[in-house]
Amino acid sequence: YQTDDLTPVHYFHYTPDAIFVTKDSQFKTLQDLIDYAKKNPGMVTMSGSGSNSSNNLAQVRFNELAGVKTTYIPFSGTGPAVTAILGKQTVAGFNYAPSGIAHGEKMRMLAVAAEKRMPAFPDVPTFRELGFDLVGGAYRGLSVPKSTPENIRLKVSDIISAINKEPSFVKKMEAGGFVLTDITYKEMPKFM
């Protein structure tokens, strides 16, 4: 299939981009990293999950907003990108917030690209709190074939909205480092 063959009907959550360093890194705060990057253009290497991925786009945006030049190193996925941070093959990394759950004892999250602090990481500031308008990550949702009738598209979106409001589902997703969204079929054109 081709992307054009599908119609998105609902985005239900995203995993925010976040900057990670090792626990023993000299960088205790995002400002520490920014100060170093300003004095050493290009020397801060950032791992991430692939070229032109959400991690890569977040790194480009971060460079613009912070007025720094970091060097992005694309890896074949989240796992290898985290391994690069842990193995100190890179100075830092843009990865997805849930990596902080799996590797939180070995990595420090400096900032997260969520609109507000995440329940799973209450001590981690958002980029916005720190003065950088950086919100986003890997969005997840449902699409249907373009041939799907309008009433079915709406029904699928309504079902996902109902699931997203279930308290046990909300608790599980937030504990897992996800940010719930409720971008319905009717809101999809504007969101896209």
Image: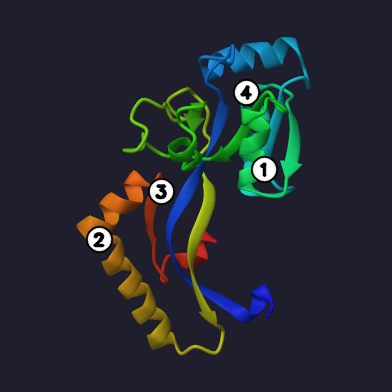
In primary-sequence order, the first of circles 4 and 2 is 4
Q: CA distance from mark 3 to mark 2?
A: 14 Å
- Identify which residue, 134 or 180, lies in the foreground: 180
Query: Disc 3 marks which residue?
Result: 178
**Alpha carbons under labels 1 and 2: distance apart:** 34 Å
Assess whether mark 2 and mark 1 are in contact (beta carbons under 8 angstroms): no
Q: CA distance from mark 3 to mark 4?
A: 25 Å
Residue at numbered disc 2:
165
Residue with the mark numbered 1: 80
Q: Quadrant of the N terminus?
A: bottom right
User: Which mark lies nearer to you, 1 or 3?
Assistant: 1
At x 66% / y 40%, what residue is drawn?
Answer: 81
Q: Depth-wise, is mark 4 or mark 1 nearer the camera?
A: 1
Q: Residue type at mark 1?
A: Pro
Mark 1: which secondary structure?
Answer: helix
Quarter occupied by residue 62: top right
> Counting residues from the N terminus, which is met first, the one under dot 1 or under dot 3?
1
Q: Secondary structure at mark 4?
A: helix
The type of residue carrying mark 4 is Ala
Instruction: Decide which of tag 3 and tag 2 comes sooner along the chain.
Output: 2
Q: Secondary structure at mark 2?
A: loop
